[in-house]
Image (cartoon, rainbow, N blue to C red):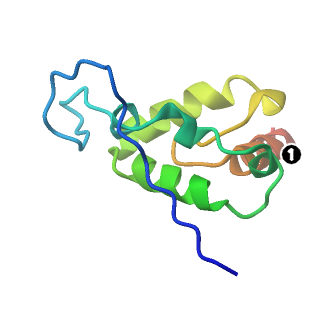
Amino acid sequence: MPIVTYRARPMTGVARTATSTTSTPASPVRPCRQVDPELFFPVPESRTAQTPTDRELIALAVCARCPLPRRQTCLTQQLAYGPTAQWGVVGGTTAAQRRELLRADRRVG
């Protein structure tokens, strides 16, 4: 089976004022804003996959470059939409991981 490698494409046609590609608490730069947004919303089978797809792994690596407080903010905002609105990679998690977090929260709460 051939190995498939996906690379995040830089966004084109977008003015950038920051030069850093790493986000810090004092910096508004977000690594996710430096790549093609489609990377974070992979093919439909990722919606039900229990293990991350290749593209999700790349998107997760981009999320990992953000500081933890920023990832927590993204995750909290996405979880507020509920279990039926979970798709793509957000806040360093896949849709399947967020749905599991929401299920666990319902069991505890």
Is 108 or 70 nearer to us in this picture?
70
Residue 22, image quadrant = top left
Outermost residue toward the front in this view? 2
Q: Residues within 10 Å of mark 1 (few under 14, many from 20)?
A: few
Q: Quadrant of the N terminus?
A: bottom right
Is 104 or 48 nearer to us in this picture?
48
Q: Is residue 51 left or right of residue 31?
A: right
Instruction: Relative to 64, say whether 28 is above or below.
Output: above
Residue at the (81%, 33%) spot, across then down: 83
Q: Is residue 38 left or right of residue 107?
A: left
Residue 20 position within the rendered picture, expressed as x and y whole percent measured from the top left: 16, 39
Residue 87 in sight in this render: yes
Instruction: Relative to 38, say whether 59 is above or below.
Output: below
Q: Secondary structure at mark 1?
A: helix
Amino acid type indicated by mark 1: Arg
Outermost residue toward the bottom in this view? 1
Residue at the (41%, 43%) spot, across then down: 9
Is 94 or 19 nearer to us in this picture?
19
Residue 45 position within the rendered picture, expressed as x and y whole percent measured from the top left: 80, 50
Residue 31 position within the rendered picture, expressed as x and y whole percent measured from the top left: 34, 40
Q: Quadrant of the C terminus?
A: top right
Q: Which residue is mark 1?
A: 107
Q: Is residue 18 left or right of residue 47?
A: left
Instruction: Relative to 31, say whether 15 is above or below.
Output: above
Residue 90 in sight in this render: no
Residue 12, image quadrant = top left
Please tell me how many numbered marks the rendered image carries: 1
Residue at the (47%, 38%) spot, across then down: 72
Residue 55 position within the rendered picture, expressed as x and y whole percent measured from the top left: 58, 54
